Image: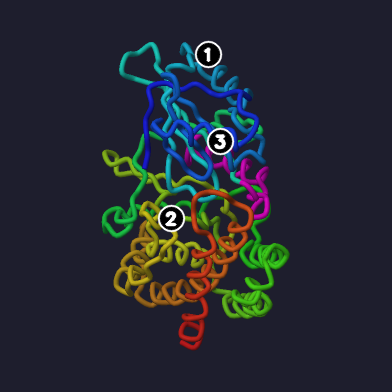
């Protein structure tokens, strides 16, 4: 759900604690309020207030919005020749993000009916356990230089300001549209062939081992036992041995290609991939496996953590996507080539379940975004133990 406001005002330290804000809301229950685990948005005395909570450990002081961010927006507006007035801001909280908090902020320009819009990314708690933020920003800048994704407009302690792409974010159902699916396949092939600076070694296996170590250090004994964390090291070793054949093609992979990280210009029929936080060099079959697994998810429901594996694409749909992927650069793919890649993809779904299972488990302990990470992790691990014997034996 998104809500648009005509103007905002930012509390700057008037409330000394979360309790005081909650008390204000409790004793002013008539106030129209939008609430998430990280944000209160409410009207009081004709003004609209944003109150950030869960991201406070990343630099937000309770009851205030960073002066650094406000100054950054002011400087950007000045560079563009806009008159920046905080009373004329429009703020939309974009739902569906599970690592960061995302906001769309707009303000009037000198051209009537043509507002200026930027995207604000507030870094979530505990993300340093998953990836190196400096490395992610270098990737972001490099992608922008290559003409992929949004431009980086500025950074502040709690996050960054990005170019707002005037395109439509895909929905869960869009992934099943044959025309859109073909565009995604072609864009993935293009992405995989990017020549990115730095190491081109596969990251997947060591990253999972690092996450397993973090999970063991964070989890209660109950969760260590429930999620078989003491066995997972052996499982990861076995998967790496089984899936590291010489025929595996290594490319620059997005690694998180859910529908919310894909945008489409419906007029131009062009696809843009966004959010490269988990991007790295990996087997391309893993990236394709991740995309197929994401078809079981819909993050814009009342229970966004619930996965429906009856929606996992069947063999016909997978092969159609694979042929579009292989043939997107003019290469005429054979049935044998497509079948080999399809078999590899199915095996890499096992690694994908462990990967995101560990992510969910760690996130349940460190991230306070309104998402049931623990139940999400539980479903991913259930799929791993269910499918492992069937897939590897075949």
Within 10 Å of the Cα at label 2, are there few (<14), some (14-19), or many (20+) other Cα atoms?
Answer: many
Q: Residue at x 60, y 37 (%)?
A: 18
The range drawn in magenta is 125-151
Q: Residue at x 58, y 58 (%)?
A: 364
Provide residue 235's location: percent of width, then percent of height.
62, 79
Within 10 Å of the Cα at label 3, are there few (<14), some (14-19), or many (20+) other Cα atoms?
Answer: many
Q: Residue at x 53, y 73 (%)?
A: 381
Q: Is residue 348 left or right of residue 177?
A: right
Residue lying at the far bottom of the rendered structure: 393
Of the numbered discs 3 and 2, the one sitting upstream in the chain is 3
Is residue 224 placed above or below 362 in the rendered structure? Answer: below
Q: CA distance from mark 3 to mark 2?
A: 26 Å
Is residue 313 inside the magenta stretch?
no
Of tags 1 and 3, the one toward the viewer is 3
**Residue 294 in view (yes/no):** yes
Q: Which mark is residue 258?
A: 2
- Residue corresponding to mark 1: 78
Q: Which mark is residue 347?
A: none
- Residue corresponding to mark 3: 52
Q: CA distance from mark 1 to mark 3?
A: 26 Å
Of the numbered discs 1 and 3, the one sitting upstream in the chain is 3
Q: Quadrant of residue 294?
A: bottom left
Is residue 5 placed above or below 212 in the rendered structure? Answer: above
Within 10 Å of the Cα at label 1, are there few (<14), some (14-19), or many (20+) other Cα atoms?
Answer: few
Q: Residue at x 31, y 67 (%)?
A: 320
Q: Quadrant of residue 222?
A: bottom right
Of tags 3 and 2, the one toward the viewer is 3
């Amino acid at each position: 759900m998104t809500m648009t406001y005509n103007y905002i005002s930012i509390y700057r330290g008037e409330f000394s604690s979360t309790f005081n804000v909650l008390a204000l809301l409790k004793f002013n229950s008539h106030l129209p309020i939008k609430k998430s685990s990280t944000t209160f948005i409410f009207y009081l005395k004709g003004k609209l207030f944003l109150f950030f909570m869960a991201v406070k450990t990343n630099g937000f002081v309770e009851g205030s919005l960073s002066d650094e961010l406000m100054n950054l927006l002011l400087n950007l507006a000045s560079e563009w020749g806009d008159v920046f007035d905080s009373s004329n801001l429009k703020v939309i909280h974009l739902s569906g993000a599970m690592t960061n908090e995302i906001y769309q902020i707009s303000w009037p320009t000198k051209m009537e009916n043509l507002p200026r819009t930027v995207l604000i990314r507030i870094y979530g708690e505990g993300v340093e356990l998953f990836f190196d933020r400096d490395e992610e920003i270098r990737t972001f800048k490099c992608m922008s230089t290559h003409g992929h994704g949004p431009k980086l407009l500025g950074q502040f302690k709690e996050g960054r300001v990005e170019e707002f792409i005037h395109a439509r974010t895909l929905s869960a159902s869009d992934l099943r549209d044959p025309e859109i699916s073909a565009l995604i396949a072609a864009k993935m092939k293009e992405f995989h062939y990017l020549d990115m600076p730095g190491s081109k070694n596969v990251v997947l296996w060591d990253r999972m081992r690092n996450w397993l170590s973090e999970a063991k250090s964070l989890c209660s004994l109950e969760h260590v036992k429930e999620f078989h964390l003491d066995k997972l090291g052996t499982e990861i070793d076995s998967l790496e041995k089984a899936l590291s054949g010489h025929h595996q093609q290594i490319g620059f992979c997005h690694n998180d290609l859910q529908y919310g990280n894909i945008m489409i210009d419906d007029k131009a029929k062009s696809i843009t991939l966004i959010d490269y936080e988990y991007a790295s060099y990996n087997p391309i079959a893993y990236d394709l496996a991740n995309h197929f697994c994401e078809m079981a998810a819909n993050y814009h429901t009342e229970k966004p953590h619930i996965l429906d594996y009856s929606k996992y694409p069947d063999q016909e749909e997978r092969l159609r996507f694979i042929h579009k992927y292989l043939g997107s650069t003019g290469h005429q793919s054979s049935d044998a080539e497509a079948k080999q890649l399809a078999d590899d993809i199915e095996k890499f779904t096992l690694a994908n379940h462990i990967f995101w299972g560990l992510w969910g488990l760690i996130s349940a302990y460190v991230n306070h975004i309104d998402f049931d990470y623990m139940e999400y992790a539980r479903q991913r691990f259930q799929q791993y133990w269910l499918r492992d014997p069937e897939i590897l034996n075949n």
